[in-house]
Amino acid sequence: MPTGVLIYEDNHSLRESIAQLLTYSQGYVVLGSFPHVLQVETQVKQLQPEVILMDIDMPGGINGIEAVKRVRAFDKKTPIIMLTVFDDQANVLEAIFAGASGYLLKKHLSDRLLEAMQEVLTGGAPMSPNVARMVIASMHKYAPATETPYQLTAREQEILTALSRGTGYKAIAAQYYISLDTVRTHIKNIYQKMQVHSQLEAVAKFRDGGIS
């Protein structure tokens, strides 16, 4: 079955380009393509996408970050990738705290969108490189110097850092000379210890200083 996608983007040309890219790519079907998020709750409930692509700067008084919050009020699991020109810290962290699953700058869409969608569908957290660096810097700023967060093992902390950089599961397995199944097991343990459901939730919670 193809993966159902919803697109929220106010720029008509870009919205159509994304829709065409997905239509011509095997494994995806565009369930809806919208220039605003005023009916986002109804649309997500009715169309039940597997992935949502969400612009931040949207018209009509509701931006993409607020739309993410509204979706997360009733749907905690559907991956939402932010597509935006904004890479400032305020927008990045606000999107993460709202429940975004990934964060891509529009200038990287042609090169990274399909890869990012595959990554997010397997539990990854795709981010443009400079966004990943910003998240890591924020995480380090709030990390305690003498306490292991959430009783994570050294390897789990290494893997969490790699995930925060947008590194895929296969690359992590190769980097640490472990199997893909072992990577998945470590990630499952990280989520359980931190009581989260996604990589960005884990990074955001770590950054927020809730150390056990």
Image (cartoon, grey):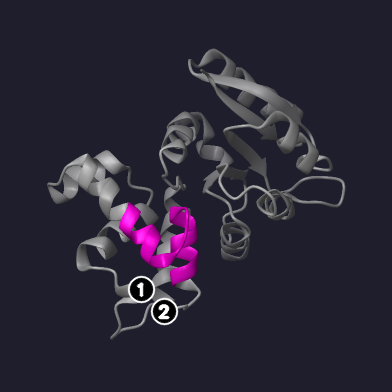
Dominant SS type (magenta):
helix
User: To which residue does mark 2 refer?
Assistant: 211
Where's residue 171, x and y in %? 25, 42
Q: Is residue 200 magenta?
A: yes
Q: Residues within 10 Å of mark 1 (few under 14, many from 20)?
A: some
User: To which residue does mark 1 refer?
Assistant: 150
Q: Residue at x 46, y 48 (%)?
A: 127
Is any atom of residue 9 visible in this view? no
Q: Residues within 10 Å of mark 2 (few under 14, many from 20)?
A: some
Where's residue 163, x and y in %? 35, 53
Q: Quadrant of residue 160?
A: bottom left
Instruction: Name above or below for residue 44 compared with residue 206.
Output: above
Q: What residue type is disc 1 on?
A: Tyr
Which residue lies most toward the right here?
A: 60
Instruction: Name above or below for residue 194 compared with residue 66.
Output: below
Q: CA distance from mark 2 to mark 1?
A: 6 Å
Q: Is residue 165 left or right of residue 24?
A: left
Q: What residue type is disc 2 on?
A: Ile
Is any atom of residue 178 visible in this view? yes
Q: Is residue 83 left or right of residue 56?
A: left
Q: Is residue 198 left or right of residue 180?
A: right
| Picture disc at residue 117 | none
- Magenta segment: 188-206
What is the quadrant of the C terminus in the image? bottom left
Q: Residue at x 84, y 43 (%)?
A: 38
Q: Is residue 63 magenta?
A: no
Q: Residue at x 58, y 39 (%)?
A: 106
Q: Are marks 2 and 1 in contact (CB under 8 Å)?
A: yes
